[in-house]
Image: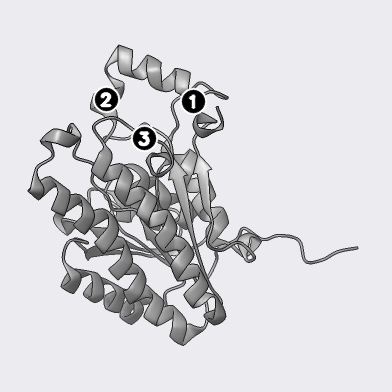
Amino acid sequence: MPTDFPSFDLTGKVALVTGAARGLGRAISLALANAGADVALGFRDVNARAGLPSEITALGRRALPLQMDVNRLDQIFKAVDDTVLHFGRLDILVNSAGVAPDNLAENVREQDFDLTLAVNLKGTFFASQAAGRVMIRQTSGRIINISSQAGFVALPTESIYCMTKAAISHLTKCLAIEWGKYNITVNAVAPTFIRTPGTQEYLANPEFRADVIERIAALHRIGEPMDVAGAVVFLASNAASLITGDTILIDGGWTAR
């Protein structure tokens, strides 16, 4: 009888989640803790952390709130250093921080272009680099990037956001190939529209909401943050040990039509 069944248990692992304050980052942080991981929480403003650390401790896991604006490289590297200093290791990085200022392509402002690339792409790369250096020394690690279905389909008024999310999926492949020899896997998840504070205004528009539900061709429902968090926990676990360089679409069938 086989004894090497897939394990989704993260007990003893240490995770760092960027953009942990709300939405996907918050849900992912809680899901990782529920699976057994201790969680370092990267906040753009650590004073706005609300009750997330106490929710994680209520699950029986340790939480470490960190000042981590991914637009600031000094804060990225300090957050990784502080995580290792506090917990002794870093096993999982989730790059969840992101922005999405929308505008018609002909009206995009340079400052919005620069900010979107700085947070979504530059922040993801350098957080991965900082964590990757730790994981190389450990000869183990899991990096999970948050891409988007917008990296696979065109969304009007989101040209720069779409560009960065497509780049994240390709960066995921590049890092996976470079770091696989150190037993580090690098993957991404690409959600559809998820019910978060960031999408609330758009989904409140009945016409927009109806269009989104129609385009989610197979399931016809708006996604919830835990729909994404489940895939992240899987990729962080030993059950996904042979998966790397991949982007898992969590889009309810949007891109299948």
Query: Of helix, strand and loop, which one carries label 2?
Result: helix
Identity of the residue furthest to the bottom in this view: 137
Question: Looking at numbered disc 3 in the image, what kind of residue is underneath it?
Answer: Ala
Front-most of residues 186 and 54: 186
* Residue topped by disc 2: 202
- Which quadrant is home to the C terminus? top right
* Residue topped by disc 1: 216
Q: CA distance from mark 3 to mark 1?
A: 14 Å
- Residue 53 pos. (x, y %): 31, 56
User: Can the viewer see residue 13 in this picture?
Assistant: no
Query: Of callouts 3 and 2, which one flags the residue occurring earlier in the amino acid sequence?
Result: 3
- Residue 68 pos. (x, y %): 21, 63
* Residue topped by disc 3: 154
Compared with 248, 254 (above or below) is above
Question: Looking at numbered disc 2 in the image, what kind of residue is underneath it?
Answer: Tyr
Residue at 42% of width from left, 74% of height from top? 90
Question: Looking at numbered disc 1 in the image, what kind of residue is underneath it?
Answer: Ile
Compared with 249, 255 (above or below) is above
Front-most of residues 87 and 149: 149
Task: Determine crowd level at label 1: few under 14, some 14-19, many 20+ residues with C-alpha closer than 10 A.
Answer: many
Q: Nearer the viewer, mark 3 or mark 1?
A: 3
Residue at 64% of width from left, 65% of height from top? 242
Compared with 191, 219 (above or below) is above
Residue at 34% of width from left, 74% of height from top? 129
Query: Of callouts 3 and 1, which one flags the residue occurring earlier in the amino acid sequence?
Result: 3
- Residue 16 pos. (x, y %): 37, 65
Q: CA distance from mark 3 to mark 2?
A: 17 Å
Q: CA distance from mark 1 to mark 2?
A: 16 Å
Residue at 86% of width from left, 64% of height from top? 2
* 134 sits to left or right of 100: right
